[in-house]
Amino acid sequence: MRNRKLLFAIICVTAPVVLGVGQARPPLDSLSWLSGCWEGRQGNAVIEEHWSKPAGQSMLGFSRTIKNNMTTSYEFIQIREEGNSLVYLPQPQGGQRVSFPLSKSGQNQFTFENSAHDFPQRIIYERKGAMLLAAIEGILKGKQEREEFLMKKVRCNEPINQ
């Protein structure tokens, strides 16, 4: 009888994991590698992203693109724990916040998706060794598009070299 109770307890604990039922969301801490300052180039434009460490159920970030010594675009960003998931919340040009719930995650890659959004529908962050690959993708003007931004980690107080 005792062995049956032990077997029942083991089945109750492991069945949800084996069956994929009630899988836990990745904790915000699994994105801690994103914390800090990142910089990349596209032609003569410099792209930078700055991320806080995970705390208070959120990470705060901002990005900007500098071209010809002028800020040509910027974005305020949050990654928040909401309910049982993570949500990516960008505000391009400081405008309306858009919600992209986490759709896929692994140790080094996180994909946030909002199929109802015009473009992009997916935002991807992937750690590639010491580099960060940020990508946006989706349907634009009836065609599948993807734009990638490869960045390296830099010291946060380092001046930007145009």
Image (spheres, grey):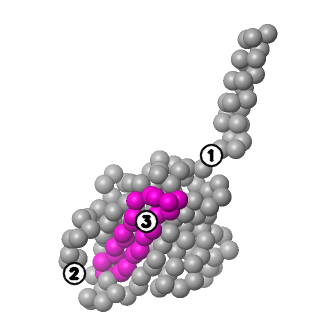
Select label 1 or label 2 by which is in front.
Answer: 1
Disc ID at residue 162: 2
Relative to the observer, which residue lies in front, 35 or 103?
Answer: 35
Question: What's drawn in magenta, residue-wise?
Answer: 45-65
Q: Could you say where residue 39 lies in the image, as x and y percent from the top left?
A: 30, 69
Select label 3 or label 1 by which is in front.
Answer: 1
What's the amino acid at mark 3? Ala
What's the amino acid at mark 1? Ala
Residue that appears at 33% across and 63% down = 36
What's the amino acid at mark 2? Gln
Residue picked out by circle 1: 24
Is the Cβ of the residue at disc 1 closer than 8 Å to that at disc 2? no
Residue that appears at 61% across and 71% down = 99
- Regarding residue 112, the answer to whether it shows in the image is no
Mark 3 vs 2, N-terminal side? 3
Element assignment for label 3: strand
Residue picked out by circle 3: 134
Magenta highlight on residue 61:
yes
Q: Residues within 10 Å of mark 3 (few under 14, many from 20)?
A: some
